[in-house]
Image (tube, rainbow, N blue to C red):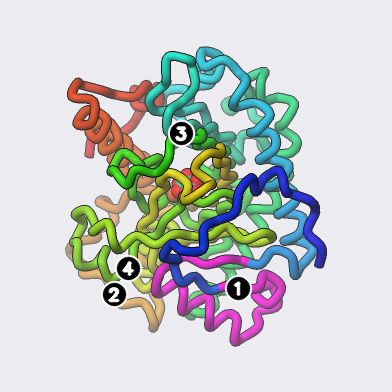
Amino acid sequence: MTIPDMSDLYPAPFPQDVPLAPLQRLSLDKLLHHDPAEAERLTEVCTDTGFFYLDMMDHPMGRKMWEDACVAVRSGIDVLPRVPMAEKKAFKAPADIKVLDRGYQTGFVKPDGQPRDSEMFMVPAYEVFTKTPNNSFEPPAWLSQHMNSFQRAMVSGNRVANTILSVLEQNLQLSAGSFTDLHRLTDSSGDFLRVLRYPAAEADDGKPDNARFPAHKDAVSIAMLFTWVGGLQIADPEAVHQAQGGPVPEESWRWVQPLPGHAIVNLGEAMEIFSNQVLRSGLHRVVKAPGPQVAHDKYSVLLVVRPRDDTLMQSFQSPVIPQEEGEKHRESEVMTSIEWGNSKIRRLQDHIDKTFTERSGKAFALDRSWKQGKVEAV
Ligand SMILES: O=C(O)CCC(=O)C(=O)O
Ligand SMILES: [Fe+2]
Protein backbone atom coordinates (compact mmCIF):
# COMPACT_ATOMS: atom_id res chain seq x y z
CA MET A 1 0.00 0.00 0.00
CA THR A 2 1.51 3.31 -1.01
CA ILE A 3 1.15 6.21 1.36
CA PRO A 4 0.70 9.66 -0.23
CA ASP A 5 3.74 11.94 -0.05
CA MET A 6 3.96 13.51 3.38
CA SER A 7 7.65 14.34 3.51
CA ASP A 8 6.72 17.92 4.52
CA LEU A 9 5.10 16.52 7.68
CA TYR A 10 8.26 14.60 8.69
CA PRO A 11 10.87 17.40 8.75
CA ALA A 12 13.56 15.44 10.66
CA PRO A 13 14.07 11.80 11.68
CA PHE A 14 12.78 10.47 15.00
CA PRO A 15 15.88 9.52 17.03
CA GLN A 16 16.56 5.83 17.53
CA ASP A 17 18.16 6.09 20.96
CA VAL A 18 15.17 7.06 23.13
CA PRO A 19 13.11 4.60 25.22
CA LEU A 20 9.94 3.72 23.32
CA ALA A 21 6.51 2.79 24.67
CA PRO A 22 5.90 -0.87 23.75
CA LEU A 23 2.72 -0.30 21.75
CA GLN A 24 0.99 -3.04 19.77
CA ARG A 25 -0.03 -2.43 16.16
CA LEU A 26 -3.60 -3.47 15.47
CA SER A 27 -5.31 -3.80 12.12
CA LEU A 28 -8.46 -1.79 11.38
CA ASP A 29 -9.43 -4.30 8.69
CA LYS A 30 -9.26 -7.21 11.14
CA LEU A 31 -11.18 -5.30 13.82
CA LEU A 32 -13.89 -4.41 11.31
CA HIS A 33 -14.25 -8.09 10.53
CA HIS A 34 -14.31 -9.00 14.23
CA ASP A 35 -11.29 -11.25 13.68
CA PRO A 36 -11.21 -13.20 16.97
CA ALA A 37 -7.42 -13.04 17.46
CA GLU A 38 -7.35 -9.28 16.75
CA ALA A 39 -10.33 -8.68 19.05
CA GLU A 40 -8.42 -10.56 21.75
CA ARG A 41 -5.31 -8.42 21.19
CA LEU A 42 -7.43 -5.26 21.38
CA THR A 43 -8.90 -6.37 24.67
CA GLU A 44 -5.44 -7.19 26.00
CA VAL A 45 -4.01 -3.76 25.21
CA CYS A 46 -7.13 -2.01 26.46
CA THR A 47 -6.89 -3.80 29.79
CA ASP A 48 -3.17 -2.95 30.02
CA THR A 49 -1.90 0.41 28.69
CA GLY A 50 -5.09 1.49 26.89
CA PHE A 51 -2.85 2.76 24.03
CA PHE A 52 -2.17 1.17 20.65
CA TYR A 53 -1.28 1.95 17.04
CA LEU A 54 -4.07 1.37 14.58
CA ASP A 55 -2.98 0.56 11.04
CA MET A 56 -5.25 2.71 8.92
CA MET A 57 -3.93 1.58 5.55
CA ASP A 58 -5.34 -1.93 5.41
CA HIS A 59 -8.97 -0.84 4.91
CA PRO A 60 -10.56 1.87 2.71
CA MET A 61 -12.25 3.45 5.77
CA GLY A 62 -8.89 3.81 7.48
CA ARG A 63 -7.14 5.12 4.38
CA LYS A 64 -9.84 7.74 4.08
CA MET A 65 -9.44 8.72 7.72
CA TRP A 66 -5.67 9.00 7.33
CA GLU A 67 -6.10 11.19 4.26
CA ASP A 68 -8.71 13.29 6.08
CA ALA A 69 -6.29 13.74 9.00
CA CYS A 70 -3.53 14.85 6.60
CA VAL A 71 -5.87 17.43 5.05
CA ALA A 72 -6.95 18.62 8.52
CA VAL A 73 -3.37 19.03 9.73
CA ARG A 74 -2.46 21.00 6.62
CA SER A 75 -5.39 23.30 7.43
CA GLY A 76 -3.80 23.84 10.86
CA ILE A 77 -0.39 24.47 9.28
CA ASP A 78 -2.02 27.00 6.99
CA VAL A 79 -3.76 29.04 9.69
CA LEU A 80 -2.11 28.71 13.10
CA PRO A 81 1.29 30.36 12.47
CA ARG A 82 -0.09 33.27 10.46
CA VAL A 83 -3.45 34.30 11.99
CA PRO A 84 -2.85 37.12 14.54
CA MET A 85 -3.13 36.01 18.18
CA ALA A 86 -5.99 38.42 18.95
CA GLU A 87 -8.04 36.93 16.13
CA LYS A 88 -7.34 33.37 17.24
CA LYS A 89 -8.19 34.22 20.86
CA ALA A 90 -11.51 35.68 19.76
CA PHE A 91 -12.63 32.11 18.93
CA LYS A 92 -14.04 31.35 22.37
CA ALA A 93 -16.16 28.66 23.86
CA PRO A 94 -19.33 30.48 24.91
CA ALA A 95 -20.28 30.20 28.57
CA ASP A 96 -22.64 27.44 29.70
CA ILE A 97 -22.13 25.30 26.66
CA LYS A 98 -20.28 22.00 26.19
CA VAL A 99 -16.98 21.00 27.68
CA LEU A 100 -14.04 22.42 25.82
CA ASP A 101 -15.31 21.10 22.52
CA ARG A 102 -14.76 24.37 20.65
CA GLY A 103 -12.63 27.48 20.75
CA TYR A 104 -8.96 28.39 20.75
CA GLN A 105 -6.58 27.85 23.67
CA THR A 106 -2.98 28.73 24.24
CA GLY A 107 -0.59 29.02 27.16
CA PHE A 108 2.20 31.57 27.41
CA VAL A 109 2.37 33.97 24.47
CA LYS A 110 5.78 35.44 23.55
CA PRO A 111 6.25 39.16 22.81
CA ASP A 112 6.20 38.35 19.08
CA GLY A 113 2.62 37.09 19.45
CA GLN A 114 3.55 33.43 18.97
CA PRO A 115 2.73 30.77 21.56
CA ARG A 116 5.75 29.47 23.47
CA ASP A 117 4.63 25.91 24.22
CA SER A 118 1.42 25.04 22.46
CA GLU A 119 -1.81 26.24 20.95
CA MET A 120 -4.91 24.42 19.79
CA PHE A 121 -8.38 24.88 18.48
CA MET A 122 -11.41 22.64 18.71
CA VAL A 123 -14.35 22.23 16.38
CA PRO A 124 -17.49 20.61 17.86
CA ALA A 125 -18.90 17.64 15.98
CA TYR A 126 -22.56 17.70 16.94
CA GLU A 127 -23.16 21.34 16.12
CA VAL A 128 -21.54 21.20 12.73
CA PHE A 129 -23.65 18.22 11.71
CA THR A 130 -26.89 19.14 13.44
CA LYS A 131 -28.05 22.69 12.96
CA THR A 132 -30.98 23.60 15.19
CA PRO A 133 -32.22 27.00 16.40
CA ASN A 134 -30.59 26.48 19.83
CA ASN A 135 -27.41 25.31 18.40
CA SER A 136 -25.77 27.80 16.17
CA PHE A 137 -22.07 27.11 15.95
CA GLU A 138 -20.35 29.50 13.58
CA PRO A 139 -16.67 28.91 12.88
CA PRO A 140 -14.43 31.99 12.93
CA ALA A 141 -13.58 33.42 9.51
CA TRP A 142 -10.04 31.99 9.63
CA LEU A 143 -11.40 28.45 9.90
CA SER A 144 -14.44 28.61 7.67
CA GLN A 145 -12.71 27.56 4.46
CA HIS A 146 -11.40 24.44 6.24
CA MET A 147 -14.68 23.27 7.73
CA ASN A 148 -15.31 20.69 5.01
CA SER A 149 -12.03 18.99 5.72
CA PHE A 150 -12.76 18.93 9.47
CA GLN A 151 -16.24 17.54 8.87
CA ARG A 152 -14.91 14.72 6.73
CA ALA A 153 -12.34 13.81 9.38
CA MET A 154 -15.02 13.77 12.09
CA VAL A 155 -17.24 11.41 10.10
CA SER A 156 -14.28 9.06 9.58
CA GLY A 157 -13.30 9.34 13.24
CA ASN A 158 -16.77 8.41 14.43
CA ARG A 159 -16.77 5.30 12.23
CA VAL A 160 -13.38 4.12 13.40
CA ALA A 161 -14.21 4.79 17.07
CA ASN A 162 -17.40 2.79 16.75
CA THR A 163 -15.48 -0.09 15.19
CA ILE A 164 -13.34 -0.22 18.34
CA LEU A 165 -16.32 0.21 20.67
CA SER A 166 -18.21 -2.57 18.95
CA VAL A 167 -15.36 -5.04 19.50
CA LEU A 168 -14.98 -3.94 23.11
CA GLU A 169 -18.67 -4.30 23.95
CA GLN A 170 -18.67 -7.79 22.48
CA ASN A 171 -15.55 -8.80 24.42
CA LEU A 172 -17.01 -7.45 27.64
CA GLN A 173 -20.09 -9.63 27.03
CA LEU A 174 -22.37 -6.60 26.70
CA SER A 175 -25.29 -6.55 24.31
CA ALA A 176 -24.65 -5.12 20.86
CA GLY A 177 -25.09 -1.34 20.97
CA SER A 178 -24.21 -0.95 24.66
CA PHE A 179 -21.28 1.34 23.78
CA THR A 180 -21.97 2.17 20.15
CA ASP A 181 -25.48 3.52 20.78
CA LEU A 182 -23.95 6.12 23.09
CA HIS A 183 -21.59 7.41 20.40
CA ARG A 184 -23.71 8.33 17.40
CA LEU A 185 -22.59 11.33 15.41
CA THR A 186 -26.12 12.72 15.39
CA ASP A 187 -26.67 12.71 19.17
CA SER A 188 -25.65 15.67 21.30
CA SER A 189 -22.25 14.94 22.84
CA GLY A 190 -18.93 16.66 23.42
CA ASP A 191 -17.18 15.07 20.41
CA PHE A 192 -14.67 17.34 18.73
CA LEU A 193 -11.77 17.65 16.36
CA ARG A 194 -8.68 19.35 17.78
CA VAL A 195 -5.68 20.66 15.89
CA LEU A 196 -2.61 21.29 18.03
CA ARG A 197 0.61 23.11 17.27
CA TYR A 198 3.73 22.91 19.42
CA PRO A 199 6.17 25.51 18.09
CA ALA A 200 9.80 24.65 17.45
CA ALA A 201 11.95 25.07 20.53
CA GLU A 202 15.48 25.48 21.78
CA ALA A 203 17.31 22.19 22.25
CA ASP A 204 15.92 19.80 24.85
CA ASP A 205 17.40 20.77 28.21
CA GLY A 206 15.76 17.97 30.18
CA LYS A 207 14.11 20.47 32.55
CA PRO A 208 10.50 20.05 33.67
CA ASP A 209 9.40 23.06 31.67
CA ASN A 210 9.91 20.86 28.67
CA ALA A 211 6.24 20.11 29.29
CA ARG A 212 4.03 21.16 26.40
CA PHE A 213 0.86 19.41 27.50
CA PRO A 214 0.92 18.25 31.13
CA ALA A 215 0.35 14.65 32.21
CA HIS A 216 -3.31 13.73 31.80
CA LYS A 217 -5.79 11.08 30.81
CA ASP A 218 -8.32 12.07 28.18
CA ALA A 219 -11.84 12.93 29.42
CA VAL A 220 -13.37 11.06 26.49
CA SER A 221 -14.34 7.55 25.38
CA ILE A 222 -11.86 7.08 22.52
CA ALA A 223 -9.14 9.45 21.33
CA MET A 224 -7.51 8.98 17.93
CA LEU A 225 -4.32 10.95 17.45
CA PHE A 226 -2.54 11.73 14.21
CA THR A 227 0.88 13.22 14.69
CA TRP A 228 4.05 13.32 12.62
CA VAL A 229 6.73 14.65 14.96
CA GLY A 230 7.67 13.14 18.36
CA GLY A 231 6.91 14.63 21.76
CA LEU A 232 4.11 12.40 23.00
CA GLN A 233 5.07 10.22 25.96
CA ILE A 234 3.16 7.56 27.88
CA ALA A 235 3.88 6.68 31.50
CA ASP A 236 4.60 3.08 32.36
CA PRO A 237 1.26 1.84 33.86
CA GLU A 238 3.04 0.16 36.78
CA ALA A 239 4.71 3.48 37.73
CA VAL A 240 1.32 5.23 37.50
CA HIS A 241 -0.14 2.65 39.85
CA GLN A 242 2.72 3.06 42.33
CA ALA A 243 2.49 6.87 42.22
CA GLN A 244 -1.13 6.70 43.51
CA GLY A 245 -2.22 9.89 41.80
CA GLY A 246 1.06 11.74 42.48
CA PRO A 247 3.66 12.61 39.83
CA VAL A 248 5.29 9.61 38.17
CA PRO A 249 9.11 9.45 38.15
CA GLU A 250 10.77 10.98 35.05
CA GLU A 251 12.37 7.67 34.08
CA SER A 252 8.98 5.99 33.68
CA TRP A 253 7.99 8.12 30.67
CA ARG A 254 8.32 6.38 27.27
CA TRP A 255 8.28 8.02 23.84
CA VAL A 256 5.73 7.25 21.15
CA GLN A 257 7.22 7.23 17.68
CA PRO A 258 4.73 8.50 15.07
CA LEU A 259 4.28 5.85 12.36
CA PRO A 260 3.10 6.76 8.85
CA GLY A 261 -0.37 5.40 8.09
CA HIS A 262 -1.12 4.69 11.76
CA ALA A 263 -3.32 6.43 14.31
CA ILE A 264 -2.27 6.43 17.96
CA VAL A 265 -5.44 5.38 19.73
CA ASN A 266 -6.11 5.57 23.42
CA LEU A 267 -9.07 4.86 25.62
CA GLY A 268 -10.29 7.78 27.67
CA GLU A 269 -11.42 7.64 31.26
CA ALA A 270 -15.07 7.14 30.29
CA MET A 271 -14.17 3.57 29.34
CA GLU A 272 -12.62 2.99 32.78
CA ILE A 273 -15.91 4.05 34.36
CA PHE A 274 -18.13 1.97 32.04
CA SER A 275 -16.02 -1.13 32.68
CA ASN A 276 -15.32 -0.46 36.37
CA GLN A 277 -11.57 -0.26 35.62
CA VAL A 278 -11.38 -3.44 33.51
CA LEU A 279 -10.49 -1.25 30.53
CA ARG A 280 -7.66 1.19 31.19
CA SER A 281 -6.91 4.73 30.14
CA GLY A 282 -3.23 5.69 29.89
CA LEU A 283 -1.50 8.70 31.45
CA HIS A 284 0.29 10.71 28.76
CA ARG A 285 1.91 14.10 28.15
CA VAL A 286 3.69 16.05 25.46
CA VAL A 287 7.23 17.36 25.89
CA LYS A 288 9.65 19.04 23.48
CA ALA A 289 10.25 16.92 20.40
CA PRO A 290 13.23 14.56 20.70
CA GLY A 291 16.64 14.97 19.03
CA PRO A 292 16.74 16.89 15.74
CA GLN A 293 12.94 17.16 15.66
CA VAL A 294 13.08 19.83 18.38
CA ALA A 295 13.88 22.49 15.77
CA HIS A 296 10.54 21.97 14.01
CA ASP A 297 6.92 22.76 14.77
CA LYS A 298 4.95 19.70 15.82
CA TYR A 299 1.31 19.44 14.77
CA SER A 300 -1.33 16.93 15.82
CA VAL A 301 -4.91 16.21 14.86
CA LEU A 302 -6.98 14.65 17.61
CA LEU A 303 -10.42 13.19 17.02
CA VAL A 304 -12.42 12.17 20.06
CA VAL A 305 -15.77 10.61 20.79
CA ARG A 306 -17.53 11.13 24.08
CA PRO A 307 -20.67 9.50 25.49
CA ARG A 308 -23.96 11.17 24.61
CA ASP A 309 -24.58 14.12 26.98
CA ASP A 310 -27.24 12.39 29.10
CA THR A 311 -25.28 9.14 29.59
CA LEU A 312 -24.93 8.16 33.25
CA MET A 313 -21.28 7.71 34.06
CA GLN A 314 -21.41 4.38 35.83
CA SER A 315 -20.30 0.84 35.11
CA PHE A 316 -22.23 -1.59 32.96
CA GLN A 317 -23.42 -4.94 34.31
CA SER A 318 -21.66 -7.93 32.81
CA PRO A 319 -20.24 -11.22 34.06
CA VAL A 320 -16.75 -9.88 33.31
CA ILE A 321 -17.19 -6.46 34.98
CA PRO A 322 -16.82 -6.51 38.77
CA GLN A 323 -19.80 -4.95 40.56
CA GLU A 324 -19.48 -1.50 42.08
CA GLU A 325 -20.18 -1.15 45.78
CA GLY A 326 -23.91 -0.34 46.00
CA GLU A 327 -23.87 2.55 48.48
CA LYS A 328 -21.21 4.48 46.63
CA HIS A 329 -23.19 4.81 43.44
CA ARG A 330 -26.76 5.77 44.14
CA GLU A 331 -28.47 7.00 40.98
CA SER A 332 -28.75 10.58 42.27
CA GLU A 333 -24.97 10.82 42.74
CA VAL A 334 -24.06 9.59 39.31
CA MET A 335 -22.93 12.34 36.97
CA THR A 336 -24.10 12.62 33.41
CA SER A 337 -21.50 12.60 30.68
CA ILE A 338 -21.62 16.37 30.31
CA GLU A 339 -21.28 17.02 34.06
CA TRP A 340 -18.45 14.53 34.28
CA GLY A 341 -16.61 16.04 31.32
CA ASN A 342 -16.92 19.52 32.84
CA SER A 343 -15.51 18.42 36.17
CA LYS A 344 -12.58 16.58 34.55
CA ILE A 345 -11.57 19.43 32.28
CA ARG A 346 -11.90 21.99 35.03
CA ARG A 347 -9.60 19.97 37.27
CA LEU A 348 -6.99 19.66 34.50
CA GLN A 349 -7.15 23.37 33.69
CA ASP A 350 -6.85 24.35 37.35
CA HIS A 351 -3.77 22.14 37.49
CA ILE A 352 -2.33 23.88 34.42
CA ASP A 353 -2.96 27.32 35.99
CA LYS A 354 -1.30 26.19 39.21
CA THR A 355 1.75 24.92 37.32
CA PHE A 356 1.99 28.21 35.40
CA THR A 357 1.70 30.15 38.64
CA GLU A 358 4.44 28.08 40.29
CA ARG A 359 6.71 28.43 37.29
CA SER A 360 6.29 32.14 36.77
CA GLY A 361 6.08 33.07 40.47
CA LYS A 362 2.91 35.13 39.98
CA ALA A 363 -0.79 34.34 39.87
CA PHE A 364 -1.73 33.06 36.46
CA ALA A 365 -5.02 31.90 35.04
CA LEU A 366 -5.53 31.23 31.39
CA ASP A 367 -8.49 32.90 29.76
CA ARG A 368 -11.26 30.33 29.68
CA SER A 369 -14.63 31.80 29.00
CA TRP A 370 -16.44 28.49 29.37
CA LYS A 371 -15.62 28.48 33.08
CA GLN A 372 -18.29 31.12 33.72
CA GLY A 373 -20.94 28.61 32.67
CA LYS A 374 -22.68 25.80 34.43
CA VAL A 375 -19.49 24.19 35.63
CA GLU A 376 -19.84 22.75 39.11
CA ALA A 377 -16.99 23.34 41.52
CA VAL A 378 -15.07 20.13 42.20
O1 LIG B 1 -0.41 16.22 20.45
C1 LIG B 1 -0.23 15.16 21.04
O2 LIG B 1 0.72 14.39 20.73
C2 LIG B 1 -1.14 14.73 22.18
C3 LIG B 1 -2.28 15.67 22.47
C4 LIG B 1 -3.14 15.20 23.61
O3 LIG B 1 -2.79 14.36 24.41
C5 LIG B 1 -4.50 15.78 23.77
O4 LIG B 1 -4.85 16.71 23.02
O5 LIG B 1 -5.25 15.29 24.66
FE1 LIG C 1 -4.46 13.62 25.58
Residue that numbered label 3 is attached to: 118
Label 4: few (<14), some or many (≥20) within 10 Å? some
Q: Position of residue 156 (x, y in %)?
A: 70, 53
Residue type, mark 3 in image: Ser
Residue appearing at x 71%, y 46% in the figure: 70
Is residue 309 visible in the rendered image? The answer is no
Label 1: few (<14), some or many (≥20) within 10 Å? many
Residue that numbered label 2 is attached to: 323
The quarter of the rendered structure image containing the C terminus is: top left
**Closer to us: 138 or 338:** 138
Q: Secondary structure at mark 4?
A: helix
C-alpha distance separating marks 2 and 3: 41 Å
Q: Secondary structure at mark 3?
A: loop
Residue type, mark 2 in image: Gln
Against 302, residue 59 (above or below) is below
C-alpha distance separating marks 1 and 4: 20 Å
Q: Is residue 190 left or right of residue 329?
A: right
- Circle 2/circle 3 CB separation < 8 Å: no
Residue 237: image tag: 4
Residue appearing at x 38%, y 67% in the figure: 280
Residue type, mark 1 in image: Leu
Work out which residue is located at the far bottom of the displayed protein and give it.
37
Q: Earlier in the sequence, mark 2 or mark 4?
A: 4
C-alpha distance separating marks 2 and 4: 23 Å
Residue 26: image tag: 1
Against 326, residue 40 (above or below) is below
**Closer to us: 17 or 258:** 17
The quarter of the rendered structure image containing the N terminus is: bottom right
Magenta range: 25-54
Residue type, mark 4 in image: Pro
